[in-house]
Image (tube, helix red, strand yellow):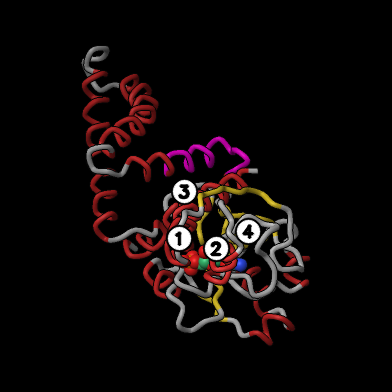
Amino acid sequence: MLHRLKEKWNVSWTRFTLIFLTFALGGSACARLGNWLLSFVLTEKNAWYWIIYVPLITILWPLCVLTISIPLGQFRFFTNYLSRMGNRIFGKQSTKTKSIAIFASGTGTNAKKIIDHFKESSVARVGLIVCNNPNAGVLNIAADNHIPVVMVNRKSFLTDTVCLDELTLHKIDLVVLAGFLWMIPKYLIEAYPNKIINIHPALLPKFGGKGMYGENVHKAVIEAGEKESGITIHYVDEHYDNGDIIFQAKCEVKYGDSVSTLAQRIHALEHEHFPKVIEQIIKG
Ligand code: GAR
């Protein structure tokens, strides 16, 4: 049972222990504080005692748990946990945590940032990785984070609905392309209208299109003598790098930049903005 809870919260055993400790210490602090406060009003444990005690404890418990979570470094987990509980109790609309599928076929540094960003979020979580490269670094990241992986080959990806079936099975709400280099077939775009986004390592509409990925893009930017480059996050349609632009951020192309120095600057921009933009899109 503990193992299942750990999987559900998607945390390491160390964090799991700290969370458990927070629950235990918070619970006992809450009971003691409740008793102490009530001792000012009632001297014996009669029916009134329990009538007041239960609602008092209900109010004190979140406060105690949150306070204890600070020194134990679990504040973010508990704010999300309590907001989920609150949503469930008060029936707020946004109870459903959205599920993201990341399509990636490379190192997966963006995928990692996105996974980490949503790890304890009540807004969304990464529920699936789709990959077309058996040697991709993103596969290790998926394994480390216990995220299921679907491997696709070009023929099945383009012609049958295996991938769509997996997205449906995993109840995916948003598809995020983070270094996925194949064109997205029409059936997927139709199944996820305005729900597939891509990150491109340049300022579209310049330096986009077929063959424009990763280092090829930075090389083209440098060769064209551009003074600035950047990142573009956009909706995906049936053409390469063509859908509506959601977000762009710029950086300087410095004199003497190599492909790798420019790539580093672009990656830093991607890591800073991509998870936040995804969250904004999900929140609408
Ligand atoms: C990212 O820089 C992304 O912009 C690029 O692939 C890289 C993946 O890096 N995507 C494209 O070029 C799409 N046209 P990562 O595997 O380290 O996240």
Q: Are marks 1 and 4 in contact (CB under 8 Å)?
A: no
Quadrant where the C terminus is found in the figure:
top right
Mark toward the viewer: 2 or 4: 2
Looking at this view, is 200 or 115 the one in front? 200
- Residue at image position (73%, 58%) is 243
238 with respect to 138 (left or right): right
Q: For numbered disc 3, what is the local secondary structure? A: loop
Mark 2 lies on residue = 222
The residues bearing labels 1 and 4 have C-alpha atoms spaced at a distance of 35 Å
**Residues shaded magenta:** 81-94
Between 90 and 77, the one nearer to me in the picture? 77
* Amino acid on which disc 3 is placed: Ser
Q: Are marks 2 and 1 in contact (CB under 8 Å)?
A: yes
- Which numbered marker is on residue 257? 1
Alpha carbons under labels 2 and 4: distance apart: 33 Å
Q: Secondary structure at mark 2?
A: helix
Give the distance between the C-alpha atoms of the residues marked 4 and 3, in whole angstroms: 15 Å
Q: Check disc 3 and report the residue beneath it.
A: 121
Horizontal and vertical percent position of residue 226: 59, 56
Question: How far across and down, in percent of the image, does residue 61 sit?
Answer: 33, 33
Q: Secondary structure at mark 1?
A: loop
Q: Which residue was labeled with disc 4?
A: 174
Q: Please tell me which of labels 2 and 1 falls first in the chain.
A: 2
Q: Earlier in the sequence, mark 4 or mark 3?
A: 3
Query: Which residue sits at x=47%, y=62%?
Result: 263
Of the image marks 2 and 4, the number of the one nearer the N terminus: 4
Residue 190 colored magenta? Answer: no
Circle 4 residues within 10 Å: few <14, some 14–19, many ≥20: many
Report, in whole angstroms, how far the alpha carbon at label 2 lies from the one at label 1. 8 Å
* Distance from mark 2 CB to nearest ligand 1 atom below 8 Å: no
Q: Nearer the viewer, residue 51 or 241?
A: 241
Residue 275 lies, in percent from the top left, at 51, 52
